[in-house]
Amino acid sequence: MTVSDAQLQEFVAGLDYPVSREDLVRWAQENGASTETLQMLRTLPAEEFDTPAELGEALAPYTG
């Protein structure tokens, strides 16, 4: 499952940090993210991301 870099950049642009996996999923649902994106977010570690760079690193295996 992959998400394009453009989709990822658009998604993370509206987040306030730090952000947890649960917050990411909730925010994505509220903003009409695709089912594929929601599934990908649910596979992230249940940790908090302090910066867009940290989140980007966690999402890197899923972007294409």
Image (tube, helix red, strand yellow):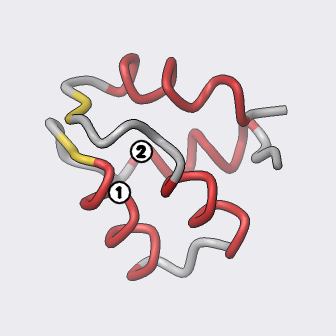
Specify the label residue 49 is tagged with.
Answer: none
Residue identified by numbered label 2: 13
Q: Residue at x 24, y 35 (%)?
A: 47
Q: Is residue 20 left or right of residue 28?
A: left
**Category of crowding for the residue at label 1, using alpha-carbon neighbours closer than 10 angstroms: few (below 14), some (14–19), many (at least 20):** many
Q: Earlier in the sequence, mark 2 or mark 1?
A: 2
User: Foreground mark, 2 or 1?
Assistant: 1
Q: Is residue 47 left or right of residue 31?
A: left
Q: Residue at x 21, y 44 (%)?
A: 19
The type of residue carrying mark 1 is Leu
> Residue 10: x, y in percent?
56, 49
Q: Residue at x 30, y 42 (%)?
A: 46
Q: Residue at x 47, y 41 (%)?
A: 44
Residue identified by numbered label 1: 24
The type of residue carrying mark 2 is Ala
* Residue 18 vertical position relative to residue 25 in the rendered view, above or below: above
**Category of crowding for the residue at label 2, using alpha-carbon neighbours closer than 10 angstroms: few (below 14), some (14–19), many (at least 20):** few
